[in-house]
Amino acid sequence: MKYTLITGSANGLGKEFAKLYARDNNNLLLVDVDEKALLQVKEELIKECPNIEVKTLVCDLSLKEELYKVKKYVDENGLFINNLVNSAGFGDRKDFLDMDIDFQMKMTDVDCNALLYFTRVFVEDMVKNNEGHIINVASIAGFYPGPYMCTYHACKGYVLLLGEAISYELRKTNVKLLTLCPGPFMSKFVEKAHNDYTFSKIKPISAKEVAEFGYKKSLKGKTLAVVGFKNKMTIFASRFAPRKFVAKTSAKMMKKGG
């Protein structure tokens, strides 16, 4: 039976993606570390879309054994993941010398390794069945160095480059991988990342807008989508600026006096 797997689906962007897939009658496998919020989302979706099945798995995606648990669950229940949305992730705005290295390594595990693992293990059946859509959530941060938020920017750069390469390799199949690159949007990210300074300078859009944009681009088979005309122009302009200038400009968006 076909299922759409969405990570980070208890809140924010992942939840909004779950709503969109549910409304198009896709069965859902929702994965998140927040059990209470995850069950609330499940109840909401079943109430709004009674014709679909919604399964949930509570997992800490920073742990390798938890990733294996998800794959084992899928295999044991005979599920075919025909849609995959890797939206789980978090950031942290701190000077590099003040960073907790264990926390930063956990970030790379969730933002990079979990995304890599799920993309790899589920794309195989998609190719065999000659159908599938993957959305990997990166960020416009992936296009720039990010002083004072270096690990997060590096993680999103990884997601961006990984997705572009895999999309090319899949070009002769009916499996499509979209790398979605939003700018700031409203979610719990700001609180967790201690990045309220950036959000005070840039008006964020809603997670719903980001999800709707990404969902439409995925259905069209796009491989890369930057959310917002201003973000597209900024990325384009940065190609012609010295890297040192780009880093300096990025730093000023992260920290007062940066």
Image (cartoon, rainbow, N blue to C red):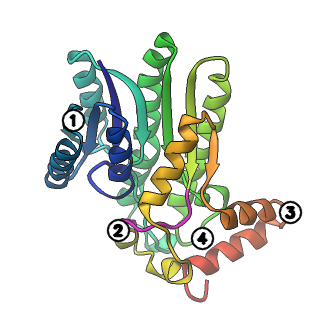
> Left or right: where does residue 5 sit relative to residue 233?
left
Quarter assignment of residue 242: bottom right
The answer to if 72 sits in the magenta stretch is no
Span colored in magenta = 182-189
Most frequent secondary structure within the magenta stretch = loop
Quarter assignment of residue 139: bottom right
Query: Which residue type does callout 3 highlight?
Result: Phe
The Cα–Cα distance between marks 3 and 4, rounded to whole angstroms, is 20 Å
Q: Earlier in the sequence, mark 3 or mark 4?
A: 4
Instruction: Mark 4: give few (<14), some (14-19) or many (20+) Cα within 10 Å.
Output: many
Q: Earlier in the sequence, mark 4 or mark 1?
A: 1
Q: Helix, strand or loop at disc 2?
A: helix
The residue beneath circle 4 is 147
The residue beneath circle 2 is 192
Q: Are marks 4 and 1 in contact (CB under 8 Å)?
A: no
The Cα–Cα distance between marks 3 and 1, rounded to whole angstroms, is 47 Å
Q: Residue at x 32, y 33 (%)?
A: 25
Front tag of 4 and 2? 2
The answer to if 184 sits in the magenta stretch is yes
> Left or right: where does residue 166 sit relative to residue 27?
right
Front tag of 3 and 4? 3
Front tag of 4 and 1? 1
> Left or right: where does residue 104 sit relative to residue 248?
left
Query: Which residue type does callout 4 highlight?
Result: Pro
Which quadrant holds the N terminus? top left
